[in-house]
């Protein structure tokens, strides 16, 4: 679809269709409607583990990918292995361009992200969003684990959105789920999750850029905590 009004109307129709639908129904529709053109991006967080569980119960051959920035926690790598074994699936891993990483580090240092917001965004771009572009190439539907409750920047998230940057449907089957709903589902189905969540890490990204949060803090407060309050996103999910 190229016409913006047609896109807006299609998004409206889809959100009306799924107004009272379960996450399973949303996923089933897009997996069956776009069998070769749908992909799910997992960071192996709790929301993504729930979605992986749901997708694996429908179609073990469905396309699932993750981005390895080269700076992840060992616990994340361990969970990747555990998840693949548990569900008998293969999660495609996309790595950053080695030449770009080497050039960035050579010019700005290994921990450049602590020096400025611009440097941090550059690091995210090279280590993550460049890989995302490759992962989404040729796809019509991008499934993600975004929820409204996760942060102020995500408070208006819809179940179905149009990502203008990548020119595809972005589907957020857990958009209206609460944290309690996510954890209830994890426990009910004994879904594997990152043990760092039990140590105060509600949101887990790259190791140097993620810390535990205190009780009462925003769940995104542990990401790039040295920066002033504001739009703390890596660029994968553009507002």
Image (cartoon, helix red, strand yellow):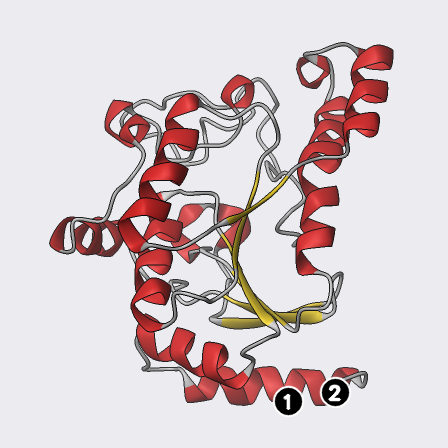
Label 2: how many Cα within 10 Å (few below 14, some 14–19, many 20+): few
Q: Which mark is residue 233?
A: none
Give the secondary structure at mark 2: helix
Q: Residue at x 74, y 37 (%)?
A: 125
* Image spot of residue 99 (x, y percent): 83, 27
Give the secondary structure at mark 1: helix
Q: Quadrant of residue 88?
A: bottom left
**Quarter of the picture holding the N terminus:** bottom right
* Image spot of residue 85 (x, y percent): 31, 46
* Image spot of residue 25 (x, y percent): 34, 80
Judging by the rendered image, the residue that carries numbered circle 2 is 5
**Foreground pick, 92 / 164:** 92
Report if the CB atoms under discs 2 and 1 are less than 8 Å apart: yes
Q: Which mark is residue 9?
A: 1
**Foreground pick, 145 / 103:** 103
In the image, is residue 8 above or below residue 88? below
Q: Residue at x 26, y 53 (%)?
A: 182
Q: Residue at x 44, y 55 (%)?
A: 145
Disc 2 from disc 1: Cα separation: 6 Å
**Foreground pick, 190 / 165:** 190
In the image, is residue 230 above or below residue 58? above
Q: Residue at x 83, y 28 (%)?
A: 100
In the image, is residue 80 above or below residue 27? above
For residue 89, side relative to residue 4 (left or right): left
């Amino acid at each position: 679809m190229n016409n913006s009004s047609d896109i807006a109307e299609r998004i409206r129709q889809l959100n009306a269709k799924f107004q009272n639908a379960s996450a399973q129904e949303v996923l089933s529709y897009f997996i069956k409607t776009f069998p070769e053109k749908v992909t799910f991006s997992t960071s192996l967080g709790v929301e993504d583990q729930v979605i992986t569980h749901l997708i694996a119960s429908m179609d073990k051959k469905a396309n699932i990918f993750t981005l390895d920035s080269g700076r992840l926690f060992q616990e994340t790598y361990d969970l990747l292995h555990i998840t693949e074994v548990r569900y008998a699936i293969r999660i495609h891993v996309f790595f950053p361009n080695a030449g770009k990483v080497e050039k960035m580090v050579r010019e700005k240092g290994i921990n450049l992200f602590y020096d400025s917001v611009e440097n941090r965004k550059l690091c995210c771009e090279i280590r993550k969003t460049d890989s995302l572009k490759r992962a989404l190439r040729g796809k019509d539907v991008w499934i993600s684990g975004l929820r409204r409750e996760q942060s102020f920047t995500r408070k208006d998230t819809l179940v179905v959105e149009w990502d203008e940057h990548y020119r595809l449907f972005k589907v957020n089957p857990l958009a209206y789920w609460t944290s309690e709903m996510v954890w209830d589902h994890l426990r009910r189905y004994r879904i594997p999750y990152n043990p760092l969540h039990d140590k105060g890490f509600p949101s887990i990204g790259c190791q140097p850029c993620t810390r535990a949060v205190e009780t009462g803090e925003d769940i995104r407060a542990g990401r790039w905590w040295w920066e002033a309050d504001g739009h703390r996103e890596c660029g994968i999910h553009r507002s």
